[in-house]
Image: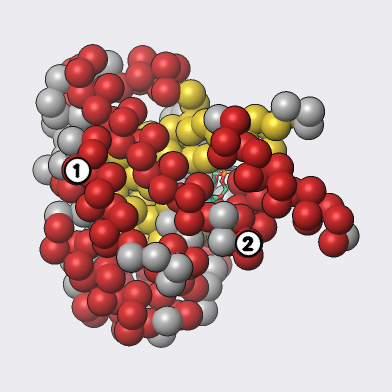
């Protein structure tokens, strides 16, 4: 076990040096207009021997070892550079690029400073960036995290809660108006149109979020039935294999290059 982890840790260090990381991108689609309004960057590790390693496997170890700090910075920088490139290819008004953050990034460094530096270096505007955090990040260290989130929000960055409904949380952070979006976890979306309990949960999240002025995204939408339920109940956005799997930048750009996707960023 211990040697497995050590191997992984060394592998991750090597990966940063040898450029073995890549980003794939998965669109977030506006349910009303059908246009893509954001692209979520998802980290991929192309290991020279074992092939593609899932982030679920290596992110926890990157967090424990602190390697998530340089890796997180790499992700942000790569996503911003990609956004710049899309802008040059397709014009000014392209969807936001969205990056996932880890708890450790709120503790081990000055996150606001790091993000500011990367935006400045890459020439990406704060309004073109979104960040996703889980409820557990807020619950771990509420005051400090909320302070950081408020600063990021004031810069103009859009903030989302990822995997909503899976962590225990007080919900009181929702009153602070720092959060723009809730992403309903895939586990509630999976059985929509089959399981009445999940339908009740999703409907309740929609009502709560909307009364607080928070937009709602459904994660992991795979079927037309799920999509129909979400549309009927006023969900704002969706993401999932039904529209597109996470894809390399050059493939996902084909989905972006359409007039419908030019509304954007104002949402
Ligand atoms: P997440 O941010 O909640 O991302 C959604 C995950 O669900 C992605 O898995 C995506 O490929 C998958 N997914 C999307 N649509 C569907 C669908 O319709 N059906 C199913 N079955 N799955 C779907 P992925 O890429 O393996 O990422 C897993 C998790 O790893 C992410 O969950 C996120 O928490 C973490 N992660 C990924 N990239 C990064 C990163 O750059 N930094 C940090 N800190 N975490 C990351
Ligand atoms: Mg996410
Ligand atoms: Mg999620």
Determine whether 12 is above or below 143 in the image. Answer: above
Q: Determine the secondary structure under disc 2.
A: helix
Categorize mark 2 by other alpha carbons within 10 Å: few (<14), some (14-19), many (20+). Answer: some
The picture places residue 228, in percent across and down from the top left corner, at 40, 42
> SS of the residue at dot 1?
helix
- Give the x, y percent position of residue 30: 27, 39
Residue 231 seen anywhere in this rendered image of the structure: no
User: Which residue position holds label 1?
Assistant: 120
Q: Which residue is located at x 13 percent, y 26 percent?
A: 92
On the question of residue 58 being in view, the answer is yes
Q: Residue at x 35, y 19 (%)?
A: 253
Q: Say which residue label 2 marks.
A: 65
140 lies left or right of 234: right
Whether disc 2's CB lies below 8 Å from ligand 1 is answered no
- Relative height, residue 174 to residue 75 (above, below): below
For the point 27% across and 61% down, the residue is 112
Q: Using the image, determine if residue 27 lies above or below residue 255.
A: below
Tell me how far mark 1 sits from mark 2, CA to CA: 28 Å
At 38% from the left edge and 56% from the top edge, which residue is drawn?
132
Quarter that holds the N terminus: bottom right
**Which callout, 1 or 2, points at the residue further toward the start of the chain?**
2
On screen, residue 96 above or below 92:
below
Residue 149: x and y in percent read 27, 68
Return the residue nearer the eye: 255 or 146: 146
Is 265 placed left or right of 193 in the picture?
Answer: left
């Amino acid at each position: 076990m211990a040697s497995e982890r050590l191997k992984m840790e060394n592998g991750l260090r090597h990966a940063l040096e040898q450029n073995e990381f890549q980003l794939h991108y998965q669109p977030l689609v506006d349910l009303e207009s059908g246009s893509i309004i954001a692209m979520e960057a998802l980290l991929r590790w192309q290991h020279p021997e074992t092939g593609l390693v899932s982030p679920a496997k290596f992110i926890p170890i990157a967090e424990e070892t602190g390697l998530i700090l340089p890796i997180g910075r790499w992700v942000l920088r790569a996503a911003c550079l990609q956004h710049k490139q899309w802008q040059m290819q397709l014009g000014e008004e392209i969807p936001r690029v969205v990056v996932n953050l880890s708890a450790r990034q709120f503790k081990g460094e000055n996150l606001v400073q790091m993000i500011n530096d990367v935006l400045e270096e890459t020439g990406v505007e704060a309004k073109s960036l979104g960040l996703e955090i889980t409820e557990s990040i807020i619950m771990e260290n509420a005051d400090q995290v909320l302070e950081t989130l408020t600063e990021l929000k004031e810069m103009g960055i859009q903030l989302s809660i990822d995997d909503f409904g899976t962590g225990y949380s007080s919900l009181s952070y929702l009153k602070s108006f720092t959060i723009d979006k809730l992403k309903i976890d895939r586990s509630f979306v999976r059985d929509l149109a089959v399981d009445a309990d999940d339908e009740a949960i999703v409907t309740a999240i929609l009502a709560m979020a909307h009364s607080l002025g928070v937009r709602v995204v459904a994660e992991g939408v795979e079927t037309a039935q799920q999509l129909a339920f979400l549309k009927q109940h006023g969900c704002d956005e969706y993401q999932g294999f039904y529209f597109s799997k996470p894809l390399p930048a050059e493939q996902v750009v084909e989905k972006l290059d359409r007039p419908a996707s030019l509304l954007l960023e104002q949402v």
